[in-house]
Amino acid sequence: MSIAVENPSSTAERPWALVEASTGTVLPGRAEHHAWYNLAAGDLLVATDHHASSDSGECRVSITATDARSGAEHYRGNVYSGRRKAGECQNMLGPVFGDDQFIGAGTRIAAVTASGAPQLFDLATGTTVWTGSGTGSPLDGDDRSLLFGEFADQGALSLFDFATGALKWTVPDPGFESSPMRQLRTIVAGDRVVIDGVLRSEPGPGHVTVVFDRESGREVQRYRGFLGGAGADWVAVFAERDGQPALEFHR
């Protein structure tokens, strides 16, 4: 296992290196800095630039992989981010609010093709594992399935099998509003797909958390309040009851 670190003793153009977690050895290969993300994929040092095409509006995310032991460039490639309904690039390949910059498992991450189709991309090889049907934006997932939205902030929801790319189900737009200060929050855990937002049809402000069955896409429950967390058999919601804040756990 290796960890990507910024090495201040290196040149300004290529300051990133991998450190072997077991020994603390800094490997000799170096990677460029693009003010986005640098990570390890085996012995590869992977650098991403999510503004590679900000002027053209094509939502391109460039990826460069360098062999951390030899310093040789392993590949250069491109994936694409999804879009918000208004048309602007999402730029991120993972949640806008969250600790994960990417969605997926191991070296395989959710992204979008140049035509806007969902895809699973392997950072270790620089190749597409599968391309899914329709168009979308990565929202969430794990090593079982990947959740894409028609847009990053609104639209129909689709779940794809992680291993094969087969479409498991699609559900219509739940009706969430879109604004720069209101982002969809999602959690895929256990047999649940959980998503929250502000429903356009609901009077007044307030978030609604909707729970779908992972296998069928059937809506099984909805709660008034922010999504606070979810696990295999529980959902936590931040709510206001009788004018007082409350944290509720539902099973």
Image (spheres, rainbow, N blue to C red):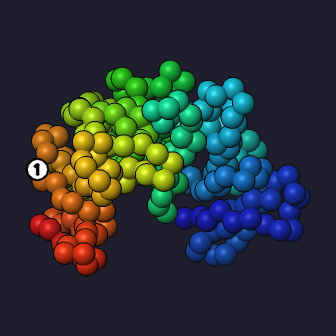
Q: Is residue 203 above or below residue 227?
A: above
Vertical side of 24 occupied by 106: above or below? above
- Is 31 rendered above or below residue 74? below
The structure residue drawn at horizontal position 60% and vertical position 64%, both measured from the top left corner, is 2
Residue 45 position, x and y percent, is: 66, 53
**Quadrant assignment for the C terminus:** bottom left
Q: Secondary structure at mark 1?
A: strand
Answer whether residue 52 is visible to the viewer in this image: yes
Q: Nearer the viewer, residue 94 or 166?
A: 94
Front-most of residues 66 and 175: 175
- Left or right placement of residue 140 versus residue 60 in this view: left
Look at the image and tell me whether residue 119 can be seen: no
Quarter-of-image position of residue 58: top right
Tell me the residue at 49%/63% (across/down).
Answer: 99
Residue 109: image location, x then y, percent: 46, 44
Q: What x and y, as percent, mark residue 125?
A: 55, 38
Q: Residue at x 22, y 34 (%)?
A: 171
- In front: 238, or 160? 238
Q: Which residue is the site of mark 1?
A: 220
Q: Between 127 and 197, which is closer to the camera in this rendering?
A: 197
| Residue drawn at point x = 37 percent, y = 32 percent | 150
Q: Which quarter of the picture shows residue 62?
A: top right
The percent position of residue 154, horizontal first and vertical second, equals: 37, 38
Judge left or right: residue 153 versus residue 77: left
Task: Answer with the quarter of the image where residue 29 lies.
Answer: bottom right
Instruction: Rate crowding at label 1 as few (under 14), some (14 to 19) or many (20 or more) other CA atoms within 10 Å.
Output: few
Q: Amino acid at mark 1?
A: Val
Horizontal side of residue 112 vs 203, given as left or right: right
